[in-house]
Amino acid sequence: MTILKKTIVGATVASSLFGATAWAADDTIKVGVLHSLSGTMAISETTLKDTVLMLIDEQNAKGGVLGKQLEAVVVDPASDWPLFAEKARELLTVDKVDVMFGCWTSVSRKSVLPVIEELNGLLFYPVQYEGEESSKNVFYTGAAPNQQAIPATDYFLDELGVEKFALLGTDYVYPRTTNNILESYLASKGVAADDIFVNYTPFGHSDWSKIVADVVALGADGKKVGVISTINGDANIGFYKELAAAGISADDIPVVAFSVGEEELSGLDTTNLVGHLAAWNYFESADAEPNTAFVEAWKARMGEDRVTNDPMEATYIGFNMWVNAVEAAGTTDVDPVTDAMVGQKFPNLSGGTAEMLSNHHLTKPVLIGEIQDDGQFDIISQTSEVPGDAWTDFLPESAVLTSDWKGLGCGMYNTETKSCVQLGSNY
């Protein structure tokens, strides 16, 4: 959901251009890769394309799946949200892929959703998001709000003594929904409405002087102020610079970001960011044996300067669970694979075990990292695995909903009326 660096220009590409072995169509299992290789999101999504290709090559070296080699089919939606839907339809109807790994922003995922539900496709979505969704055709391997936003807020309240909150976000669905949840959550914790400042800015926003002044003014009464940031893209650079220009350090007003990771920090001057925080479910600095092996394999393939990040780990977990589900089902057909996915367990890269729940969300640890001057994170807090919640408890209309595709066969079950809500979609 974020970039901090310049756009990488690319084009729609065939998997053969990336080193995937060419096989006769009948001899392979086709894996769709639906990530932007050009446009504003290319810098973040190209890395996930590279991750899927590495995982495919590793699996093929093990003998493939069901005795067949995997074949990547790579397309470029070019950071164009309607084009994501077109490319998803192309992957399913023309290329006949068995599964897709893709999307970054929530708007791209929501563009794809009606297509894969209509055609009964299968998508693994690897990025943190706002929740409030559960589709039979999607496995959400990134964090739901209760696995990132809520724990980060608790850290501010319990560990840093923050009393006033500035909720700053980019103006689109993920920040707005997340902040709606956080406003309700903070109210439940006794934080007064006057102690919460909410502001949205467009993608690429550059003039942060007034907003930073408003944040500083929030603490004029001496109460501790913290910023919860769902700012996306290169707007983050200007925001952190303005904080520094105003003489505000991480000790004065800490910022916890949900969309700033290693990839975004790579190659940047992090002077203005050191000491501020990010909340994810994985950091490259995680001290665990599986992570050591993963990082070594990535750098051996891509170069020492290429970092790993949270959406890569989510892709890694989802891919390996899909492989195991296909083997368990004995087929790549979507319905039996979907059934076999629920209950799948696979080691995460932080030393624990991820489990796929019946709501198509993972269990994930929550990590708080402090930004270092080398662009890495010092992990200062880590929880045990937290079950992902598709429907938040902190919005009245969602608190009565649950998702259970295995037991109830419904992603939007109303626990009061004991009925499955139908909105013309699986979710």
Image (cartoon, rainbow, N blue to C red):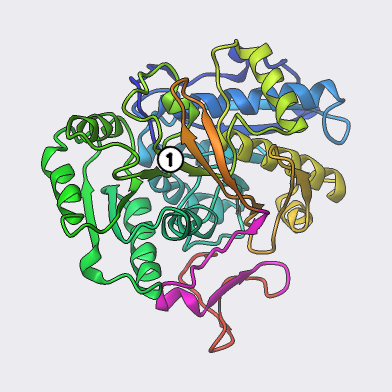
> Residue 145: where, in percent of width, then height?
48, 57
Instruction: Report the magenta residues as a range.
Output: 384-407
Q: Quadrant of the N terminus?
A: top left
The residue that label 1 is drawn on is 277
User: Is 385 one of the magenta-colored residues?
Assistant: yes
> Residue 235: where, in percent of width, then height?
26, 33
Q: Secondary structure at mark 1?
A: strand
Q: Is residue 93 visible?
A: no
Q: Is residue 163 above or below residue 232?
A: below
Amino acid residing under circle 1: Leu
Quadrant assignment, res 38: top left
> Residue 364: where, in percent of width, then height?
64, 51
> Residue 222: where, in percent of width, then height?
22, 57
Q: Is residue 323 visible?
A: yes
Residue at 76% from the left image edge and 51% from the top image edge: 337
The residue lying toward the viewer, choosing from 102 and 193, is 193
